[in-house]
Amino acid sequence: MPERPGELPLLPQPGHNTARSALTCRYRCGDACSHEAPNRSLNPCLGDVIHRALSRRGTLKGAAVLAVAAGAGLGAAPATAAAAGPAAPARHGRPPRGLGFEPVAPNTADAVIVPEGFSQQVVIRWGDPVLSRAPRFDPLRQSAAAQSRQFGYNCDYMALLDSPCGRDHQLLVVNHEYTDEEIMFFGYDPAAPTREQVETAWAAHGMTVLLVRADRRSGRLWPVAGDSHNRRITATTPFRITGPAAGSEFLRTGADPTGTLVLGTLNNCGGGVTPWGTVLSGEENFNQYFANASAVTDPVARQRLARYGLPSGSSRRKWERFDDRFDIAEEPSEPNRHGWIVEIDPYDPDSVPRKRTALGRHRAFSARSCRPGLRACPRRWTLPGLPGRADRPGRPGRPGRARCGSRCGGG
């Protein structure tokens, strides 16, 4: 906690041994690295598989080199090398398009530094208006009602799509992975958050769809606040559950006995654009938002919850005090409704987002699409997924003509 109002604990804290700040680890993933691995499966970890593969490759490569050297005669090697003179520098192909620049030298400057010939620009900030009637951001007078119409918190994925409004506009889709309440709210008490603070944090999670005016020559973008394409998706936005898990008894709750409709998306991380123009986003580290897993007495159910690292006691954010769906003692199936790949349609602000259970579930998710199908990627894994949908053709990020309506400039 800050010692005086206005002080924010941004510096590294004693005993914290990662490159990230302590607050980032605390609120982004619930200090996952500080806990034992919750998955007790006997299957090998991905890191072990990669290590064995690299070790085997290195061993085979070394054996092949020794075999060639033995066949050529080791005694002749120095003379041959001396006669050949200095080795010619390795020839590499041309760098990929957009990567032919001089890297930025390591530095400690408190500034955003870009390579020569490039420029940087702040397009939109936390709290800037997205929807119509969004109030001006006031850090001392935040509210859930205001935040639900403003740009959310903590972004690490962005998609820039062609807009039906013409070449001088584009659609920007951004995730809002997590909130850091100790930085968001002055005087925040982690042991006793207020309802307004909690509901404001719900509204700061999720995703944003924003129409931007684009200068194609300079690359500069300007937000078009209040446009009818714009949308905020939050921790309370209704999502439709699709795929093989939809309707399962493990996804049914008191508020949703059908197991097909869930509120909100949490901890959205990596994403991708599908060939039909929708955007995917992976929900990760969802476990940290729930509480009281120890209240579950059925041993099989407890093991399933433990596999994802659900907290046995209270959660760090204390959301369970304000909504029973975050209290496993009250709603033991609610955590099962998170940790999926979600899909949103940025071209239809009235569409219901979906959680695609056919793409599998993992606590550390990214998502990307590739032709002819679609893959969900938990970190560096690749899982087979949903095939391309022929009923909505189009190039990635380029909606068909039928999807370009009269919303442009709707204000």
Image (cartoon, rainbow, N blue to C red):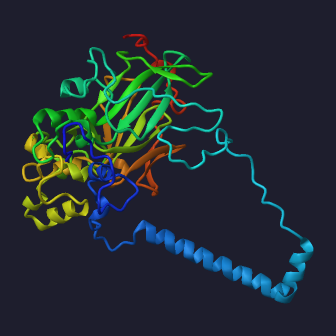
Number of callouts? 0
For this view, does 241 lie left or right of residue 328?
right
Specify whether residue 235 is in view.
no
Q: Position of residue 253 (x, y in %)?
A: 12, 45
Q: Is residue 231 left or right of residue 142?
A: right
Name the residue rendered at 11%, 46% in the picture. 320
User: Quadrant of the image for the C terminus?
Assistant: top left
The answer to whether residue 59 is above or below residue 34 is: below
5 shown above or below 31: above
Task: Please tell me which residue is depicted at 67% across the width and 39% down the height of the picture.
Answer: 97
Residue 72, horizontal then vertical, whole percent? 84, 84
Horizontally, residue 378 falls left or right of residue 182, namely: right
Q: Nearer the viewer, residue 401 or 58?
A: 58
| Relative to 409, residue 245 above or below | below
Q: Quadrant of residue 236?
A: top left
User: Can the viewer see residue 25?
Assistant: yes
Judging depth in this view, the residue of 318 and 353 nearest the camera is: 318
Q: Provide residue 249's location: percent of width, then percent of height.
A: 16, 51
In which quadrant of the rendered view does residue 324 lie?
A: top left
Q: Residue furthest right?
A: 83
Residue at x 50% of width, y 68% of height: 50
Q: Nearer the viewer, residue 214 or 352?
A: 214
Q: Is residue 194 left or right of residue 228?
A: left
Determine the residue positioned at 28% across, 70% down.
40
Q: Locate residue 48, reporting x and y percent.
A: 44, 72
Viewer-proximal residue among 149 and 88: 88
